[in-house]
Amino acid sequence: MVNGSYMKKMNRTGDFASWDGWEFFIRAKEYVFGCIVMRRAFIPPLCDSAQDIAVLLRCPAESLSHDACEVLLDECRAVADSAAPVAKVRHLATDIIQARLDSLQCTEEAYRWF
């Protein structure tokens, strides 16, 4: 039903990190599964770490219509969109980040991010 990239929609805490995601919905014989997998990368203040987050919703598949499956997927998206860090980092360690960039210690993806 759904299998594709996912863009996180809410950033209520002003998080500097990069959020990338993938969503899929599977309808099996007994259950339906809605899943959104996200990676929060370049986590401040040093922007050198990442964390993976998965939102999984499982419901019995008996007598679920297409519209009910859409509602389940919308619920999964609402939970994923509301994910936010608890710690609020309002600054970046720019001098350390610049030193790492100057000494070519970052990956190609990190250079594109900065």
Image: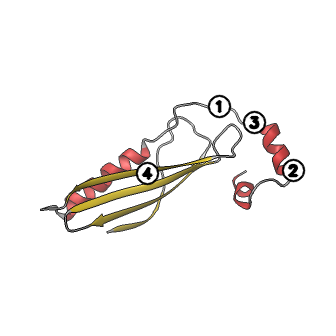
Question: Measuring 49% from the left and 53% from the top, which residue is drawn there?
Answer: 38
Residue at mark 2: 102
Residue at mark 3: 93
Q: Amino acid at mark 2?
A: Asp
Mark 1 or mark 2: name the one nearer the start of the chain: 1
Residue at mark 4: 54
Q: Secondary structure at mark 3?
A: loop
Q: Position of residue 95 (x, y in %)?
A: 82, 38
Q: Amino acid at mark 4?
A: Ala
- The answer to whether residue 91 is above or below residue 55 is above
- The answer to whether residue 30 is above or below residue 54 is below
Q: Is residue 100 left or right of residue 20?
A: right
Frontmost of labels 3 and 1 is 3
Q: Position of residue 9 (x, y in %)?
A: 46, 48
Q: Dot 1, how many residues are within 10 Å of its Cα: few (below 14), some (14-19), or many (20+)?
A: few
Question: Measuring 27% from the left and 59% from the top, which residue is drawn there?
Answer: 70
Question: Measuring 30% from the left and 59% from the top, which residue is drawn there?
Answer: 33
Frontmost of labels 1 and 2 is 2
Q: Depth check: give the residue in front, 46 or 65.
A: 46
Frontmost of labels 3 and 4 is 4
